[in-house]
Image: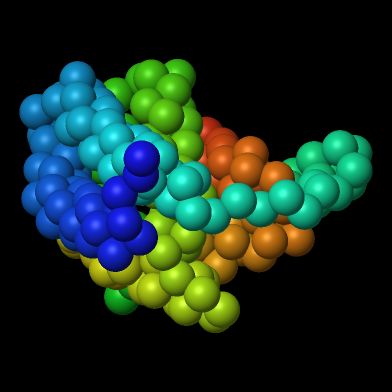
Amino acid sequence: MTAPATTRDVGAWTTVLLALLAAGPILVLSFGAADDGGVAVSAWALLLGAVWFTGGGIVLAIRRQVDRDDSPPRPARHRVLTSLLAGAALATASLVGGLVLSSWPATAPLVAAPLAAAASQPVALLLAVAFVTGAAEEVFFRLAFPTLLRGWWRWIVPTVLYAIVTLCSGTPALALMAAVLGVVAMWTLDRTRWWPAPIIVHAVWTVAMIGIFPVLVGR
């Protein structure tokens, strides 16, 4: 016997709310730990990833009882290529935007916090942690949370809340980028009907912003 739909919905929404409330302070502590060294930054980031993975997993487990998408995915080659191209386009736009912001004295402080966090630990470690955390974000905000909504609200509500939570990093530019990332990742998911798609988009973007961007700006 399964719980009534109303009870399941309450449980799913409660999980989303608790995850969002927990994530904000963790993100603040993560970026604030840059002066304490890479281990502290990575530890907070992994804790944040655990929040997203756990919350998303619970919501998916609940919604799986009532929501089943039996539509076939796109052909494998198409969905992989679409995911990679979407990630590459997003990464290119982000690199250009980041370079423009960092080149102007008035806007350079907007990207200072992410660069400081990147400089606090080895790139390989940072990339590994970012891949895990990024995948967790996609599980929560693209695969799980939207199942509670319908129509365009599936795009709007998770993306707006994703940007608001990211704003806790103290970096408005990163929050804006989170909104763009959310839209691109959600578009790719809907286009391919393939759950790894948004994770691939996020991974490509991560490589560009953590592995390439600091090199381009000389950090």
Q: Is residue 59 above or below residue 135?
A: below
Number of labels in the image equals: 0
Seen from the viewer's position, the closer of residues 195 and 129 is: 195
Q: Is residue 144 above or below residue 41?
A: below
Query: In the picture, residue 199 is in which quadrant?
Result: top right
Task: Report x, y in % for residue 184.
Answer: 61, 63
Q: Is the C terminus in the top left, top right, bottom left or bottom right quadrant?
A: top left
Q: Is residue 95 visible?
A: no
Picture residue at 49% right of the left edge, 45% below the top: 64
Q: Is the N terminus in the top left, top right, bottom left or bottom right quadrant?
A: top left
Decide if residue 77 is on the left or right side of residue 29: right
Task: Report x, y in % for residue 51.
Answer: 24, 39
Seen from the viewer's position, the closer of residues 110 and 39 is: 39
Q: How is the image coloured?
A: rainbow
Decide if residue 126 is on the left or right side of residue 27: right
Seen from the viewer's position, the closer of residues 212 and 217 is: 212
Seen from the viewer's position, the closer of residues 47 and 61 is: 61
